[in-house]
Image (spheres, rainbow, N blue to C red):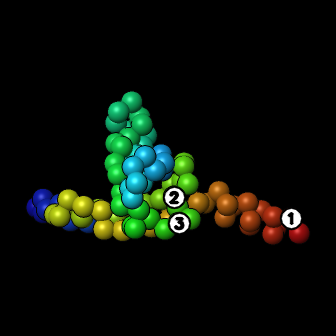
Amino acid sequence: MNLSIEPIIKIQAKVLGCLRPGYLTVFIRYGSGLADGGIPTEIPMDLVPIGLRMPNTVFSVVYDRIKGQIIEVEPTVDTTDDQKSTGEAAEE
């Protein structure tokens, strides 16, 4: 029986805005906790690509549980856009 915890996990995050210079405030795991609002967390601006810094943008945060810090930020693939593009192609 293996009870080890994965050291690196991906967590969904949603941007609130830049409330402090050099940091982007995001809600980690929104939809659960704190009345479904998530956990407000500040991420260094250097880790977040410019295209992901707008309010309400959703992306994945790669979190190292051993070090207790965010390693990187990855864009989240939006399946609704993929369905729209395939639907448009099928109509043509």
Residue 37 % position (x, y): 42, 37
> Which kind of residue does numbered mark 1 sit on?
Glu
- Cα distance between the residues tagged 1 and 2: 34 Å
Residue 49 % position (x, y): 49, 68
Which residue is tagged 3?
50
Q: State whether residue 74 appears in this view.
A: yes
Nearer to us in this view, 12 or 3:
12
Which residue is tagged 1?
91
Q: Residue at x 35, y 33 (%)?
A: 34
Mark 1 residue element = helix
Q: Quadrant of the N terminus?
A: bottom left
Question: Mark 3: few, some, or many residues within 10 Å (few <14, many ≥20)?
Answer: few
> Which kind of residue does numbered mark 2 sit on?
Arg
Nearer to us in this view, 54 or 65:
54
Mark 3 residue element = helix
Q: Residue at x 38, y 41 (%)?
A: 38
Q: State whether residue 6 appears in this view.
A: no
- Cα distance between the residues tagged 3 and 2: 6 Å
Residue 79 % position (x, y): 60, 60
Q: Are marks 3 and 2 in contact (CB under 8 Å)?
A: yes
- Cα distance between the residues tagged 3 and 1: 34 Å
69 in relation to 33, above or below = below
Front label number (3 vs 1): 3
Question: Mark 2: few, some, or many residues within 10 Å (few <14, many ≥20)?
Answer: many
Is residue 44 toward the left or the right of residue 1 in the image?
right
